[in-house]
Image (spheres, grey):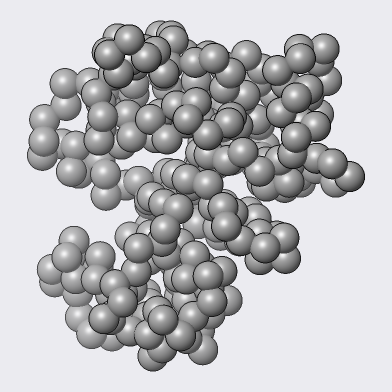
């Protein structure tokens, strides 16, 4: 069962990458890649670990510099952008990293308030409360508002991490290995959440994963990173309909049903 597609706007690119190359010394991680993310699309970037998937996310968010190539995010050229403009741009991008990095000394409520208070100085208490409640409700965890992160399960922490990212209403979501370390049932819940975030918050997302069940569940389109280049792009079924041994190995390793 693949994903139900909805209104993706193929006329509007929210991210556009051309000829992107990145090396660390003699290690060529990305060897001239092109990639577009369209408005309202969930794009899955698939690859083994250490294949440059997270390097790609870091370049998109300006945390790493490309060696060669163009990277345009929400109409801004990221290469050579000023620090101030980059900070502005980053507010429009939500990151969900592997370890959802909640502050252990703060309640769920305080964790969710933190980005608001830091980025929007003039909010009233009532506005903050309603924004916190809205994202908690969106991730299905209203009852945890006064709990400490230590009292939550791994899957709950992951969802609160996603809620904290959503509170600033980002236009783009970047998910780095969202199901890593989670059991199959919890992974399925996270996949469903990624899809419902896309619907409710109209986000455009890049989901980096090596979990094929996740890729199939959330991807409107899948791009397969092999040897530093996107070898295959398209719907999940199209990507794996190939005789390329590398792709077959990847599939067989993941899916042993």
Q: Is residue 60 visible?
A: no
Q: Is residue 239 above or below residue 170?
A: above
* Front position in the image: 229 or 123: 229
Against 186, is 54 above or below? above
Give the quarter of the image for residue 71. top left
Residue at the (66%, 31%) spot, across then down: 221
Residue at left offset 26%, top offset 81%:
105
Query: Which of the 4 image quadrants contains residue 90?
Result: top left
Provide residue 233's location: percent of width, then percent of height: 65, 20
Image-based side of 246 in relation to 59, left or right: right
Q: Residue at x 13, y 68 (%)?
A: 121
Quadrant of the rendered image containing residue 256: top right
- 76, 44: nearer the viewer: 44
Residue 243 visible, this orientation: yes
Determine whether 172 is above or below 68 in the image: below
- For the C terminus, the quadrant is top right
Pinpoint residue 25: horizontal percent, then vertical percent. Answer: 27, 13
Image coords of residue 196 (percent x, y): 62, 59
Locate residue 44 relative to residue 150 in the image: left or right.
Answer: right
Q: Is residue 105 above or below residue 62?
A: below
Name the residue at 47% across, 30% down: 50
Front one among 97 and 235 = 97
């Amino acid at each position: 069962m693949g994903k139900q597609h909805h209104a993706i706007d193929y006329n509007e690119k929210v991210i556009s990458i051309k000829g992107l190359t990145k090396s660390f010394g003699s290690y060529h991680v990305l060897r001239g890649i092109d990639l577009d993310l369209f408005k309202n699309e969930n794009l899955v970037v698939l690859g083994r670990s250490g294949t440059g998937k997270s390097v790609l996310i870091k370049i998109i968010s300006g945390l790493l510099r490309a060696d060669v190539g163009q990277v345009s995010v929400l109409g801004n050229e990221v290469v050579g952008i000023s620090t101030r403009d980059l900070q502005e741009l980053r507010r429009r991008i939500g990151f969900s990293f592997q370890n959802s990095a909640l502050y252990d000394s703060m309640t769920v409520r305080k964790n969710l308030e933190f980005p608001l208070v830091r980025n929007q100085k003039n909010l009233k208490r009532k506005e903050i409360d309603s924004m916190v409640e809205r994202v908690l409700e969106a991730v299905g965890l209203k009852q945890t508002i006064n709990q400490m992160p230590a009292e939550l399960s791994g899957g709950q922490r992951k969802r609160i991490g996603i809620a904290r990212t959503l509170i600033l209403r980002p236009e783009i979501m970047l998910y780095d290995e969202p199901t890593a370390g989670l059991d199959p049932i919890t992974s399925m819940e996270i996949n469903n959440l990624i899809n419902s975030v896309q619907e409710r918050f109209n986000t455009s997302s890049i989901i980096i994963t090596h979990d094929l069940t996740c890729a199939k569940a959330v991807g409107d389109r899948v791009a397969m990173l092999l040897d530093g280049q996107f070898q295959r792009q398209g719907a999940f079924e199209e990507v794996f309909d190939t005789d390329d041994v590398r792709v077959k190995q990847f599939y067989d390793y993941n899916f042993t049903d």
